[in-house]
Amino acid sequence: MRQVLCVSKTRRFPSFRQWKQLSNVLSKTEKQVVQTAFLLIVVSIASIVSLYLFINRVEIPTQGGEYTEALVGEPQLINPLYATSNDVDKDLVTLIYSGLIKWKPEEGLVPDLAESININEEGTVITATIRENARFHNGDPILARDILFTINAIQNPAYRSPLYGSFKGVSVVQEGDRVVSFVIEKPSAVFLQNLTVGILPSGLWADVLPQNAPLAALNLQPVGSGPFQFVEFTKDKKGSIRSYTLKPFKDWYQSPAFIDRLTFQFYPDQKSVLDALENKYVKGVSVVPFEDKEKTGQNRAVVLHSPLLDREVVLYFNQKTNEQLKRKTVREAIALAIDKTEIVNNIIQGQGRVINGPLLSSMLGYKEAETTQVIDLEKARTMLKEVMEVTEEAVKKPNKLTLTVPSGEEFSRVANYIKTQLEAIELEIEIITIPSQTFFDDVISPRNFELLLTTVMFDATQDPYLFWHSSQIGSAGLNIVEYQNADVDKLLESARATIKTEERQTAYQTFEEKVVADLPAIFLYQSNYNYAVSRDIQNVKLDSIRVPFDRFAKINEWYIKTKKTFR
């Protein structure tokens, strides 16, 4: 009885011994079915695993690679006290040195070496606290004494720094090893920009006499605190520097750069620079001129980047050299004939953005135009005719104006378009082209023009004061048409003298309205800045920059090498 019960007892799942007997009890067809099913199960599992790994596998930036860029010129003084007059020096200084604050494309001015910046209620005391982990490239900590040394050097006439005027009347007070305060005579909205100046290591510079500072070896073998540090430079037989190499600073207080080596090669002219790019001797060029944009854009090995630059192209009226231009009706007629959209879209092939006043879209107080520009050649002709018929003397004078422009393909195209449009309203135009190298001395400084087509390049403060305040009239100033308006002067002064954003915005908006109403110039377009970088270099992204060296604002995020990982 017990044996019967044991035999009749059922199992829920076959034993291993029973599975071994499976081939003996299955037919040939059944065996094929089982084998096929088993194979499908294995393939399905493998496919699911592979798909999961594929979906969740990502490439991320990793350390490695070299970026080589070609520039015109060569380094002279890689020192924040002196670099303002040399584009190569400015590029290198922005990579090697750090200031208390810096400019970021999305945020504007933000703390850099400083972990915090505090301004008192009156706006006359700016206090900076230095990051604890801030180091110079030689390993020395950055302390308040380094800030004091740098600013005192700028303020010392013996150093002959071009930045001397930026810190005139400023007192620098050490509050502790890591805290320093700047005391200014009155509130200034533009003073913060001065604190972007790179900080020198006092321990290395203290023994250098001020008058010998421009001769010091540290100007070519600098020690800063920026994302890259000096490695080496090479010279040719004539003693000119031909290349300059940097590497990431591993102890930088932010994420170190991915690119292992950053090398600059120097050439005598723009043609040599572009030839080096075409022949793949370099992986990038610092600037691509307007006339070379199309050819460079066809180079499949590079990406042409064209962020908006804080530079505007303007047609100025000199009312002191031509009686006709004193009449606002004449200036209005000229404005009616010039189609800015046509200039941007077709004449300069989309290399810019139409503007309607002295403020750019990135500037405080900018306001989008509520109406589109009206182009009416017939009305412009009628307006001119009525003005010229006011007196017999005016009728005898030919409607002739000179249009002065700097040399270059872009200006030539725009000038010829303006000439065509103005001749359509019966104004005779003579274009006078002046070499760019002598343009300031021959035209700007002596105010030697009637109509002037040129650029206005804002500095990092984006302050229009330099171009429109009456104090800037004269050969040394940049108020090119010697514009005078007492209300505009007050608005520009008040915008500078407060740190309250709303007050500054209101002042600038009113300033722009008054300038546009007075029509001392026609604001045409904001320019793009073109530079080219190899397709190997990833994550080069900027929509706008203030000055050319801002193209490096996010260089620590550029990368060449990647590695695979899973989410």
Image (tube, helix red, strand yellow):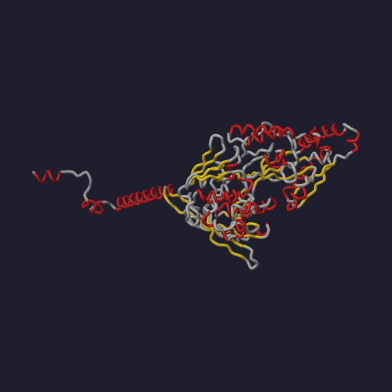
Q: Tell me the quarter of the image containing the N terminus.
A: top left
Q: Nearer the viewer, residue 515 or 558?
A: 515
- Identify whether 220 is placed above or below 549: below
Q: Nearer the viewer, residue 438 or 49?
A: 438
Residue at 70 percent of width and 34 percent of height: 488
Q: Image check: 556 left or right of 490?
A: left
Q: Nearer the viewer, residue 544 or 546?
A: 546
Q: What percent of the width, then of the height, locates residue 506?
A: 63, 31
Q: Residue furthest bottom?
A: 237
Q: Nearer the viewer, residue 224 or 25?
A: 224
- Identify whether 333 is placed above or below 474: above
Q: Image check: 357 left or right of 542?
A: right
Q: Is residue 177 visible?
A: yes
Q: What percent of the width, then of the height, locates residue 15?
A: 21, 49
Q: What percent of the width, then of the height, locates residue 17?
A: 21, 52
Q: What percent of the width, then of the height, locates residue 229?
A: 53, 56
Q: Image check: 50 left or right of 188?
A: left
